[in-house]
Image (cartoon, rainbow, N blue to C red):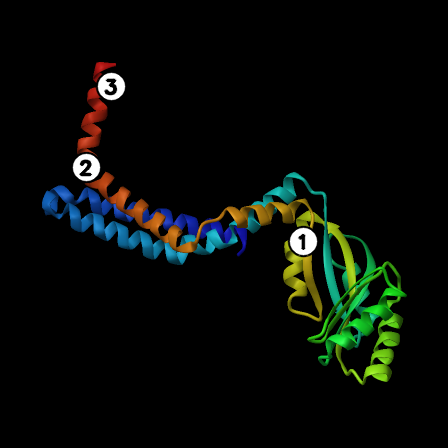
Amino acid sequence: MDFLISIIYLFIFIVILVFIFSAGLLTPMIGKKNIVVVGILGFIIGVIGGGFLMVPIYQDLPYIVGSVHSVVDPNHEILKVSVSSKDDLNQSIRVIKDMKGFKSLKETGFKLTTTSFSKDRKNFIENHLSRKYGSYEVDSSGLITVFTNKEFNLNEVNNLSQWLSYTGAITINSSSIYFDVNVNANNVVENSKNFSNGHIVVESVKGPVQNTINFVKNTMVDEKYMLLITGMVGLLVALVGSFWDTILDFIRKIRGKL
């Protein structure tokens, strides 16, 4: 959600609270016995307003905090992206380099999605990979990931694909090249959203801002509690409105004594 939209949602929720408060002010006119009705009305409106207005803001809270962090500390983050090897790799690299806040990139490996194979074949593949690569992951369901610091991993993809086909009749369904992209922290969210709609996929993000986002996510309570909180706020505002004259008299007495 855009930051400006969040501000608008918050403003509308405040307007709703003002309405609830105004309804509470009418209690002397409709009778004190209707305070319960006003309180229930305030709670229900608070829950509804919270569901439509505050919950979306709450869901985006980690990214709002992350955006603030990126402004205060505009360092850099690492986007791990994958690009289909069947696409024009040079064109994809140009798109990456044209992103906002781009600093640098390097190839870090590749991934093959294949037909499934047996555990014995898995061990055979791992033995082959261990001779060429220091880090890799093989899943017999049909996923082979290799981590390297080489450039032109497209050649490695083609060579491994041929080897898998010739030695085990394993079919390659898809293949991707991994890149680590160094970008300005305050451009991470925008770039991630832009790439989510194309052939360049953001697999993960690492860096100080992402750590902040993850921390906020881990400390957030379930959304249903957010609805309960907004409902209680609505109830409280309704009760304050209902007893507003009493509260003002109490404040005046305290001021008189001071």
**143 or 222, which is in the foreground?**
143
**Residue hosting label 2:** 243
Tell me if I can see residue 75 in this picture: yes
Q: What distance separates the C-alpha of mark 1 from that of mark 3? A: 53 Å
* 241 with respect to 2 (left or right): left
Mark toward the start of the polypeptide (2 vs 3): 2
Instruction: Pick whichever of labels 1 and 3 is earlier in the sequence.
Output: 1
The Cα–Cα distance between marks 2 and 3, rounded to whole angstroms, is 18 Å
Q: Which residue is mark 3?
A: 255
Q: Secondary structure at mark 2?
A: loop
Q: Secondary structure at mark 1?
A: helix
Residue shown at 54% from the left, 55% from the top: 2
Residue at point 85% right, 68% down?
A: 129
* Quarter of the image with the C terminus in it: top left
Q: Position of residue 220 (x, y in %)?
A: 48, 48
Q: Position of residue 51 (x, y in %)?
A: 38, 57
Mark 2 or mark 1: whose residue is earlier in sequence? 1
Q: How many marks on residues?
A: 3
- Position of residue 45 in the picture relative to residue 178 (left or right): left
The one nearer the camera, 10 or 146, is: 146
Q: Which residue is mark 1?
A: 188
